[in-house]
Image: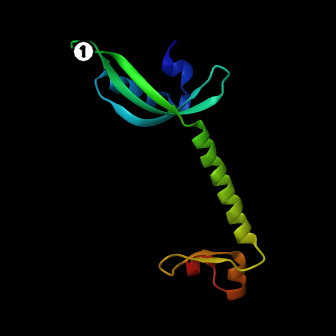
Amino acid sequence: KDFVLDFITLEHQASVKNVLDSALDGRETANFEFSLYTKDRQLVYVLLNATPRRNVSGAVVGMIGVGQDMTICKQVEVEKALVTQELQTFIDTANAPIFGIDAHGLINEWNLKSASITGFLRDEVM
């Protein structure tokens, strides 16, 4: 079967083909991220190192890919983004003023209640 057409997600097919072609041209690629489908059509995220496979005389005869399953890491990233958005919504809509100050003393958070009691909008203080 064709690795790219049969196993790689449509959005990554061109870039995966480029990485494989590079390996077949003698160039290595490290830490390349892409997604593929399992037999039961589950999405898996892979971090790939692709290297040329050479015969005893040094001619490229194929490529070898060594991958690492990054699916759980990707899922954690998505969940973290959702939690971050939920936290931001909580901060923005809290019935108490919430503000943040960075290590330099500059405002880096200013919720709606802070704006309503001070009259300063978020854009004005940040």
Q: Is residue 75 above or below residue 56?
A: below
Q: Quadrant of residue 42?
A: top right
Q: Quadrant of residue 64?
A: top left
Q: Is residue 28 above or below residue 72?
A: above
Label 1, residues with CA under 10 Å away: few <14, some 14-19, many ≥20: few
Q: Is residue 88 left or right of residue 28?
A: right
Measuring 36% from the left and 33% from the top, which residue is drawn there? 29
Q: Nearer the viewer, residue 13 or 48?
A: 48
Residue sitting at the far right: 95
Image coordinates of residue 31 in percent, x first then y, are: 42, 37
Residue sitting at the far bottom: 118
Count of residue discs: 1
Q: Could you tell me the amino acid type at mark 1?
A: Ala
Residue sitting at the far left: 57
Q: Quadrant of residue 116?
A: bottom right
Quarter in which the C terminus is drawn: bottom right
Q: Is residue 63 above or below residue 111?
A: above
Image coordinates of residue 61 in percent, x first then y, are: 31, 13
Measuring 47% from the left and 79% from the top, which residue is drawn there? 104
Q: How is the image coloured?
A: rainbow
Q: Nearer the viewer, residue 22 or 11?
A: 22
Q: Is residue 67 above or below residue 78?
A: above
Q: Secondary structure at mark 1?
A: loop
Image coordinates of residue 38 in percent, x first then y, are: 62, 23
Q: Is residue 96 left or right of residue 3?
A: right
Measuring 69% from the left and 63% from the top, which residue is drawn there? 87
Q: Nearer the viewer, residue 27 or 123?
A: 27
Q: Which residue is mark 1?
A: 59
Image coordinates of residue 14 in percent, x first then y, are: 45, 29
